[in-house]
Amino acid sequence: MNWSIVQQGIPTYEKAFMITLKLSFWGILGAIIVGLIVSFVRYFKVPVLQRILGAYVELSRNTPLLIQLFFIYYAFPELGFKISAEASGVSGLIFLGGSYMAAAFAGGLEGVPKIQVESGRAIGLTDWQLAQYVVLPQGLSLSIPAIAANVIFLIKETSIFTVVAIPELTNTALDQIGMLYDTNEALFSLVVGYAIILIPLSILLTWLERRARRGSFGN
Amino acid sequence: MAHSGINILFEGRNMVRLLGGLWISAKIAIVAIVVGLILGLILGALRTLHNPILRVILRLYLEFFRVIPTVVLLFLFYYILPQNFNINMGAESMAMLVFALWFAAEMSDIVRGGIISVSPHQVDAGKAIGLNRLQLYYYVLIPQSIQLMIPATINLVSRIIKTTSLLLLISVMDVINIGQQIIEANGQRYENGAFWVYGFIFILYFILCYPLSLWARHLERKEVVTANG
């Protein structure tokens, strides 16, 4: 291991680190929005839409991100939708993450005790009020640990973006290995890059899980 | 239809080659699952012992494999083993090794979770009739917790099947790699090659993983019912 090579590489990895963060951010944000929509549609059993989104969830959960990404990046242009590598990376992450986030939200919504819903009905809340004041606040806070776990999962999945040549962390390291043969130094910077993002998140997740076990609305 | 894109799948030996690639992925997954199951069961049982050093080591092992993305794990082993430890093995055996260690790490957490959920009365009762520690695990703890572990294990199997898509990155001739070759080789005549080939592989993975996730969900539901009864 040659530390001066590692040091020289820092600006390059910093750039790659920011790309990983940026794409993760948009992908996760999109996944949360898709997840919320899917879980609401399924929770309130909206006809037809419920079926379609159910099929989406199964397709998304039972196929690997890499092939989803290849399909978006290589097959969509053949059908007439040209899409940049970064946009297809983010779309792939949203397609994959949406169903995982939906499961996280659904778990939280189902975790709201029946008696809460019944009490809400008893004091005359409408469906919308019930969602706004009773189901959502309780359900969302119950789903936080699962969402945090998904965030970690999705950030790790961005390492697959290297296959469409997005210069994120993994791609940058592979580039360095391929061009300069600085294998150890490149792999070291790569692991450190992911560790900086993932270790704090993983500690946060453990803490959230511990807290969630305590705070369960007087049950 | 004089020239339908789907024919790219049936041209020459294309279908045979694709399914051959799938078999390589499957072979790697099967070896990793079998080795990982056995190792994970042992490590998971060890993690329930009250030995602080062992616990810390196994916890670090789990966190290492859990925190680092699988793509990065593959490259770490792929480059570091031959260069720094002079261990040379083919990409396929290397993938088996990485996936088996990864599976064992995740499995150990499932096993540990299952074992600690067995009621302590069972352990006390086992001790009272004079079982030693090994017997306690073999006759009491593992049989009672295995039902709890099955759904999570099926999900893990489905995860490892999906992870085999990464084999392409270390140049294993898996189904996706062969798909790429077919698209490139037939690109002149089939403009929609990527659509049909990647679409086909997409469906292949779905056919493999969907029954597993249905099965896991079915078992989970059954568990809830028995737990309530």
Image: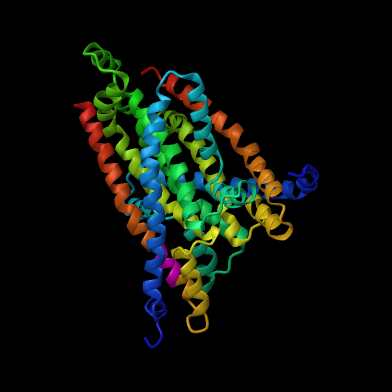
Percent position (x, y) of residue B197? 44, 70
* Of the pair A89 and B184, the residue shown nearer to us: B184
Residue A135 shows in the view: no
| Rendered image coloring scheme | rainbow
Q: Quadrant of the N terminus of chain A?
A: top right
* Magenta-colored stretch includes residue B198: yes
Percent position (x, y) of residue A85? 61, 61
Residue at the image point whose x is 33% and y is 58% from the top: B207
Classified by dominant secondary structure, the portion drawn in magenta counts as helix
* Of the pair B173 and A50, the residue shown nearer to us: B173
Percent position (x, y) of residue A212? 46, 24
Judged from this view, the residue extending furthest toward the left is B229
Q: How many marks?
A: 0
The reply, left or right, for residue B43 in relation to residue A164 is left
* Of the pair B65 and A160, the residue shown nearer to us: B65
* Of the pair A139 and B227, the residue shown nearer to us: B227
Q: Magenta segment, which residues?
A: B196-202
Residue A31 shows in the view: yes
